Amino acid sequence: MAFQYMLDACGNVLAPYNLLMLIMATAAGLVMGVLPGLSATMAIALLTGLTYNVGDHQTAIIALLGVYVGAISGGCQSAILLNIPGTPASAATAMDGFPLAKAGKGGLAIFIATTVSCLGTLLSVVFVLTLTPLLTRFALSFASWEFFLLSIFGILICGALTARGNALKGWISGAAGILVAQIGLDTVDTFERFSYGNVNVMSGIQLIPVMIGLFGFPEIVLAFKRESGGRVLELTRFNIREGFRIIRANLIGIARSALIGVGVGIIPGVGEDVGGWLSYWAMKASSREAASFGSGNPQGIVAAETGNNSCIGGAIIPVLSLAVPGSAPAAVLLAAFFMHNYRPGPLLMSESPEFVYNVAIYLVFASVAMWLLALGMARLTVRVLTVDKKILMPIIFLLCVIGAYLINYNLFDVKVMFVFGLVGLGMSYLKVPAAPFILGVVLGPMTDANLRRALRLSDGSFLPMFGRPICVAFLAVCLFMILSQIGLFSWWRRRRAGKGN
Amino acid sequence: MDTKSRDSAFGVVLFGIGVFVTAESLRMIHVATLPPFQITDLIVTPGLLPCILGLFLAFFSLLLLIETVKGAGSPGKALAENLKTAWRGILAAFGDPDFRIMLAGVAWMFVYIFFILGEIPFWLGASGFLLILFVFLRFTGRGMGFPAVREIGTLALVTAGSVILIMALFQGVFKTTLP
Amino acid sequence: MKRILSAALAALLICSLSPAGDWPNKNINMTVPYGAGGTTDLTARSIANGMSKVLGITINVINTPGAGGSAGSLNVQNARVDGYTLLANGMLAFTTMPLNGYTEKTFREWDIWIATYAPNGIIVPKNSPYNTITDLVEAIRAKPGQITAGTAGKGSGGHFGAEVIKGVAGADYKHITYAGGGPAVQATLAGEVDFCPQLLAEYKDLVIAGEVKALACLAEDDIEVAPGKVIPSILKAYPEAKKYIPMGEVTGILVPKGLPNEVLAKLDAAFASAAKEKDFLDFAAVRSFVVIPKGRAESQAFLESFASRAAYILYDAGAVTIDPAKYGFKR
């Protein structure tokens, strides 16, 4: 039965019209992913409107999944080549991607990133098809305490990873990010925080303008310097064999990142951005070359891109089984499913059992299409970077402006982008990493609402935290990270060495 | 400016921010107890997390400051020294041509976003912005001097081309409206 | 060279001088002040699609969640009234915004088209000790202020449902707020709250599949969600609840008053047509919405009584301190 459904789905996708739609949608998703400021969520939302009347519901679903895969994967190209993540999900890729590109290996980096993105999505589809019931149970065990600790955990990791050696600056950045997320009307009581009556500020600070500002402005403005004219990067031809060799050498890492990505994707409300970072962290923690992470170690790219792409399947699992979105783009996807009269949720298998298999097969085809299209597109994007930086950067600035505007068609967001651009310039000068800040803005609302909710449920007591297994695990890891950063362990080691003298 | 002075200045500023945020949150906690909110429970007051964060920032900034004066004889003196170096560095920056160019560029971006965007049709504002920025960068590039008319012409073409492409992509393909 | 340039410039000029003619000549933005996938969001998208067809442009649905729906609503209220910014909202949350202190304007300063009615339901987690609505009410009476209710925020449909329960029980519950109906239902699935009074439409499938237990609904009659699966009306167990019933969310499209008549007429026509679209009616049927399309005048009349009922529920429950009479709401 399942096999029959899958064959039918293949037949659907291979129909000429649908295939064309898939290719166009994936390409559109890739483009939107590459363009800084257009996120996957936005891309799916834009396309939902466009495909509503496209007639055959299957075609629309194919197109939407294509855009999803394309957008999440496309972000790696701008992250690697420009150090400006095209989507928040690719922030971790820029860590090692950009140094590699600066060393002239941009083509290799993109090849690796794209291939593991494809692999990540494929692996997550396997999870969708096999482990959905089990994984759904896992998703439901997350309640307010878990979400709160998860957000703290995410920030701690990101801070530790991005600030060489001393995580202090990273955590300052993360704390500042969470703080920025508090600006506006709070979600629980509608209380004005830091908004001083300004209506625009009351609706909060959007993530995308902050991201573009923090990552984009330093790159753009630094290009204004006198002697920076000339090619952005020198690009040597790369050897496909070398690319495959690196991938083959890291199969375990890929599997682990995919697992992490799916897990993160399943947790409602946490998505591709966190998935990339967690996978990166796990890879670095278990790698023998940990010290070279952040200076251009391909393993970093492998982890980050597999992680963020496997979130796609992960985020779709709760959509299908409970009608609960696993991430922001998945939420828009869910809305689209409803609009096309599907009923994701516990009744899906009885009402339209073929739907799950359709989605799985479409994702598979979308991944392959993405791989081919992205590599083809890479030749173009890479060539765009041979354009004089002084011409390229102003145009990129314009694209950033548009991206910021398109979130809510509000000029205020563009102004926010400018303000955070200035902040980003300052941070770049002070060597304070921007990525934890972004993660703080993403996870800030989760931190705040869940902390207060959890405390309200427990009447102010922190005790319940210690009775829940997942929470205890988070607490242990967080404590470990903080202690190791404070140098408690090295101090202890030094003392013992001193005693030996 | 070397790292120590940068971080000292940053630490001081950050400490100020931390104090400000903490003070604001305490005010928020107080306001929350009045109608119409009447939240008297500290655990659920909206000012809770901002207060915690403010304290964290202040604490972290102190840690940072401590790091910058580690190893020095008298921490207070070392800090003052660092801050003086930082201040001198800031003043010196304005003499740096690179810095001035970047400042001008940012100022032009500011003008575009806050005054031009949204007021006139997109293609006009964008083209004007791009063209002036291109010419300016060309002009200030190392050893360039004022560009010849032909160069301005090429830049204008590039401007026109990019704007048309952008408009085609966003308004035609994605069907969104531009500012 | 020069000719190419002038040709290009001319082309650009022609492109930009789009006729400032008839409304609508560009895409319209419809703000949904809740997250994507919720009932308001889906209803809005369904209607937006129907209206798009008639108006000939695309209506973009933009989600601006936060603060029980007031963030997005205030955005639209403060935006330019040019017919390109619409709001889709539930009337419970919307009409009670002045009472919560969000604004001084009432629904009478908006043009409103009502589309659907969705009743509240009371659900509990799968392994909850409560099996009937009486169990729950008795528990609330026994432990006032301790039984937790998960809702989408102050002023949401769920909040009203909880207030009805509070009125019936005569004792308070503990209000736990989430970022929307979806998260509130999720929390119920995770067993974090004791009950959830959100709209039935938001979790109908979960009830049918047995993932949650439905104790009652706040409509006048029982609701059959699936053959053999009936959710009793609360009136069966507590006939004294009649003064609150029917309770549920009424969703519609809104725009601040001030648009020219031609634009309003076009909106009237587009809305009426959208409310008859087969896709919309199917969508409503699947989710157990009742389609009750109303034009602008009808909506205002309907809301006079509906808003008053909602306002006094909140006021009598002590959830708001501003007297509804201040805004002309009569009992």
Image (cartoon, coloured by chain):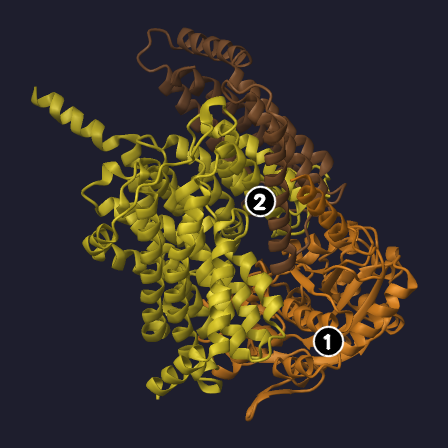
Q: Which residue is found at the position 44% from the left and 33% from the top?
A: A172
Q: According to the rendering, which colour does chain C have?
A: orange
* Residue at mark 1 shares a chain with residue at mark 2: no
Q: According to the rendering, which colour does chain B have?
A: brown
Q: According to the rendering, which colour does chain A have?
A: yellow
What mark, if any, has residue C116 been given in the picture?
1
| Residue A339 screen position, x and y as percent | 60, 74
Asked where in the image residue C4 lies, by quadrant, the reply is: top right
Chain of the residue where label 1 is placed in the rendered structure: C
Question: Which quarter shows the N terminus of chain A?
Answer: bottom left
Give the side of residue A301 with respect to residue A447, left or right. Answer: left
| Residue A244 screen position, x and y as percent | 23, 55
Look at mark 2 in the image and give the residue it sits on: A399
Q: Is residue A421 above or below residue C203?
A: above
| Residue A438 screen position, x and y as percent | 48, 42
Question: Which quarter shows the C terminus of chain A?
Answer: top left
Q: As drawn, which residue projects farthest toward the bottom?
A: C228
Q: Is residue A53 above or below residue C70?
A: below
Q: As drawn, which residue projects farthest toward the left?
A: A500
- Determine the secondary structure under disc 1: strand
- Determine the secondary structure under disc 2: helix
Asked where in the image residue C317 lies, by quadrant, the reply is: bottom right
Asked where in the image residue C323 lies, by quadrant, the reply is: bottom right
> In terms of depth relative to the viewer, which is nearer, C134 or A432?
A432
Query: Can residue B61 be seen?
Result: yes
* Amino acid residing under circle 1: Thr
Q: Are marks 1 and 2 in contact (CB under 8 Å)?
A: no
Q: Which residue is found at the position 76% from the left and 42% from the top?
A: B120
Look at discs 1 and 2 and give the one toward the viewer. Answer: 2
> In terms of depth relative to the viewer, which is nearer, B67 or C256?
C256
Mark 1 neighbour density, 10 Å: few (under 14) some (14–19) many (20 or more): many
What mark, if any, has residue A20 been given in the picture?
none
